[in-house]
Amino acid sequence: MKTTSILWSAIAAAQLAALPLTVYAGTDAKETTQPVTAEKAPPLPLHTIEGVGGIVITPVAYLVNPGPAGTVFGLPAASATYVKANTKNVESAVLTETLFGRLELGYAASRFGVGNLVDDVKDATTVNIPDSVVVHNFNARFLALPENSFDLPVPAVTIGASYKYNDGIEDIDNRLGGALGNIGYKSNDGVDFTLTATKAFPNVFGRPLIVTGGLRFSEAEQLGYLGFGDKYRATFEGNVVYLVTDWLGLAAEFRGKANAYQPIANPRKDGGYLVGREDNWWTIGAAFIVNPHTTVTVGWGHFGELLNTTEDKGLAVQAKYEF
């Protein structure tokens, strides 16, 4: 299963939020040394499709809309993302809230449309399956180490846990007579654990560059869209963001994938699959800061084989609003 999430590359600007407000004073390096008074920080980072601060498919260590220093409650942030690949699509709605400037809570309802898998499964088995599943993501992330703590150039470090519940995959497995259970499916829910580090470099060719790397420990197959196995696997994920102007950010991200299931061949198509093997995902995109509350992102990604088809390109768009 190669991947479908590339759809989300666009959201890349997410990491910009971590930058000190002085970075946004202007494009000149000299200007960045002057403090800037602002009622609200830029509406970054963005939201991943799983409901945390980041780009489209990978998180950053910065939290979303934390509020002024010393406050208990930040203001909520909401987003909607749509991704269209070849035959597959994703729709995701996200809401986040940050407390004490250190704890980000988030929820995402993410619908995955399986496309022509419905027809291929019916041709191969005579069984009708639903055309989509919805994964509910309940997230908590804690900023364990703020950036530049102890007056040292250390990255921001965030630890996170995401409980995921797939409300459609068990029905599909039952209709198929337990076929998914035979290849590794064990449950319709699971928990991902993440460790993420992000560092901003304010003056790279005169503009800010933000670099993120992290580890994910998960039992999920295809982000949980196909359910969960019985063994945790560690994967690397990371992204980079470059703030070309004060209103435009370019980003790229990579998410390593680990196969939780064995593939299922399509008996009606020579060399074809009903469930293929996962592939690593990568995306590129651009995020536009419309105003202090709104970000609009567009992107392109490469995901390869996804279930029964090759999805080697996809387009995505996201709108995010911070209150």
Image (cartoon, helix red, strand yellow):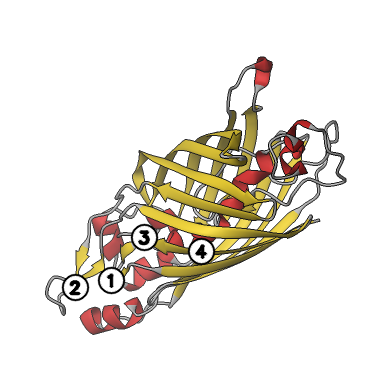
Callout 1: 10 Å neighbours few (<14), some, many (20+)?
A: many
Residue labelled with disc 3 = 3
Is the residue under label 1 in contact with that under label 2 (CB below 8 Å)? yes
Distance from label 1 to label 4 (Cα)? 24 Å
| Residue at disc 4, secondary structure | strand
Is the residue under label 4 in contact with that under label 2 (CB below 8 Å)? no
| Residue at disc 3, secondary structure | loop
- Which is more N-terminal, label 4 or label 1? 4
**Residue 73: image x %, image y %?**
82, 41
| Residue at disc 2, secondary structure | loop
Q: Which mark is residue 299?
A: 4
Residue shown at 25% from the left, 63% from the top = 276
Distance from label 3 to label 2 (Cα)? 18 Å
- Which is more N-terminal, label 4 or label 2? 2
The quarter of the picture where residue 10 lies is: bottom right
- Toward the left, the furthest residue is 270
Judged left or right of residue 322, residue 131 is left
Residue shown at 30% from the left, 80% from the top = 127
